Image (cartoon, helix red, strand yellow):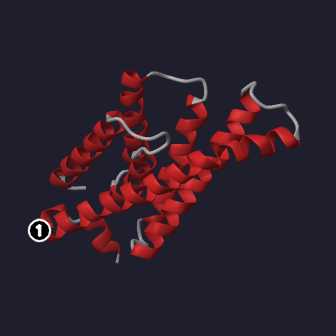
Amino acid sequence: MNKTRFLFLTAITLAAVAARLLPHPPNFSPVAALALFAGASFASKRAALLVPLVALFLSDLVIGFYPLAPVVYSSFALVACLGFWLRRRQSTRFIAVTAVAGAVMFFALTNFGVWAFGSWYPMTSAGLVACFVAAIPFFRNTLASDLVFTALLFSILALAQRRWPILADVSAAAAS
């Protein structure tokens, strides 16, 4: 990856961290979109995994940590892995599908974590169902924010690459 592209992607990442610190509705956050974007955009898979996790960690230093942080961080790492799949398939349709898949995966994993590691719901199938049902209103915000921020991040990069060709990912162009 060229240095200019890396710096531009880092700037987008910092903007997403800042957006997480602004007041927002519950679960309306750019972190999952950032994870998907990083997985699809950073040449280094290590950087693609670390970027959303470091962004989450930095913002958690301000917001505060929570007991389910390992589940949340793992969920975002898996969303970044969806971005790896997206690298060679960047079309509006595939970007939208992976954003929805990431939101569903985050919903499933974090709410299973709430049920499995928390004390709010009985450790029964009825408790698991109750946990997921109670989380549906939060899923609407998760899905909406993932779609909005994913569209925003990928659009910003696409527009910037048209304006400044140096930002193009030459490794992706060479592989095409």
Quadrant of residue 176 within the rendered picture? bottom left
In the image, is 79 to the left or to the right of 155? right
Relative to 162, is 62 above or below?
above
| Residue that appears at 55% across and 29% down | 69
Q: Which residue is mark 1?
A: 163
| Residue that appears at 42% across and 27% down | 60
- The reply to whether residue 113 is in sight is yes
- The reply to whether residue 169 is in sight is no
Q: Where is the N terminus found, in terms of image quarters? A: bottom left
Q: Amino acid at mark 1?
A: Arg
In the image, is 134 to the left or to the right of 176? right
Q: Nearer the viewer, residue 158 or 51?
A: 158
Residue 104 at x, y percent in the picture = 60, 55
Quadrant of residue 114 within the rendered picture? top right
| Residue that appears at 44% across and 45% down | 28
Q: Nearer the viewer, residue 83 or 1?
A: 83
In the image, is 24 to the left or to the right of 161? right
Q: Nearer the viewer, residue 8 or 108?
A: 108
Relative to 154, is 67 above or below?
above
Relative to 9, is 134 above or below?
above
> Dot 1: what SS?
helix
Q: How many marks?
A: 1
Quadrant of residue 20 within the rendered picture? top left
| Residue that appears at 87% across and 43% down | 125
